[in-house]
Image (tube, rainbow, N blue to C red):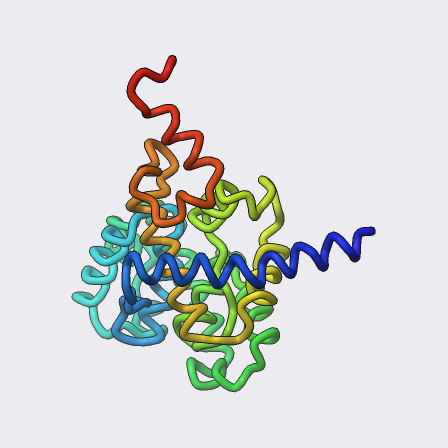
Amino acid sequence: MAATADGAAAATDAIRLPAIFRRLLAAYGPQHWWPAASPFEVMLGAILTQNTAWANVERALARLATAGPLTAAGLLALAPAELAELIRPAGYFNVKARRLQAFCAALEAAGGLDALATMETPVLRSWLLAIHGIGPETADDILLYAYERPVFVIDAYTRRLFERLGLLAPGTGYELIRARFERALGSDLPLLNEYHALIVRHGKEVCRARRPRCADCCLAADCAYAGNDIALQRPGHAQ
């Protein structure tokens, strides 16, 4: 019975997940992600963006650039307090300074960016996850956008959107969600890159945690949450 249910879910994912991507792409167009000048800057951004808005990360990266070249050796040469002050706009700056230096130390010990590029994706993912402060979402950001590996990034926007669409149960584990997306979408790197970026765009502008704009949603026709929300906003509805 469980195998039958899993097969049905896989068949549904194989149809609906690509269809949702096509609608989002038609609504927003290509997003040209990740916004960074180099793979190393992608890595720094992935760590800094934890629990903060991207605009704050951009300010932190700009301040870092004033202190010297954005390299692992350059960041390790900074005193922890100096690094923390430079990245203050990103929030949790003392914690993130420690995480950045832990990452840079591990990167230097491993032989640098080129050495990591020779690792198979599962090995590289395990290496990233072993570093203090790097969780699955950050690791997958780095894999997808810095090393162009075919993985799917799961974040709060993804959970919210697909729970509202009825495709995810609340509390579903990260690895299970990632496996479902990667099984349905395959190893199409441009699609995986674009899909995550589109979900973030949609989550920020329309499928918001508070006051979602369901009436403007390109996915509303197949979303029970949107149907309920739009009905509540109709004139004359009893509140």
Q: Number of numbered discs present? A: 0
The one nearer the camera, 17 or 234, is 234
The one nearer the camera, 98 or 45, is 45
In the image, taking residue 118 as reference, residue 9 lies left or right, namely right
In the image, taking residue 127 as reference, residue 213 lies left or right, namely left
**Residue 139 showing in the rendered view:** no
The one nearer the camera, 162 or 73, is 162
In the image, taking residue 22 as reference, residue 5 lies left or right, namely right
Name the residue rendered at 56%, 76% in the picture. 121
Residue 150: image x %, image y %?
A: 50, 74
Instruction: Give the residue at the far right of this rendering.
Output: 1
Name the residue rendered at 55%, 43% in the picture. 166
| The image quarter in which residue 112 lies | bottom left
Instruction: Give the residue at the far top of this rendering.
Output: 238
Residue 115: image x %, image y %?
A: 48, 85
| The image quarter in which residue 229 lies | top left
Name the residue rendered at 45%, 66% in the picture. 103
Residue 141: image x %, image y %?
A: 44, 64
Residue 149: image x %, image y %?
A: 49, 76
Pick the quarter of the image with the C terminus. Answer: top left
Name the residue rendered at 34%, 50% in the picture. 202
| The image quarter in which residue 61 lies | bottom left
**Residue 142 showing in the rendered view:** yes
Relative vertical location of residue 52 with respect to residue 12 in this rendering, above or below: above
Relative vertical location of residue 180 with respect to residue 118 in this rendering, above or below: above
Relative vertical location of residue 114 with respect to residue 148 in this rendering, above or below: below
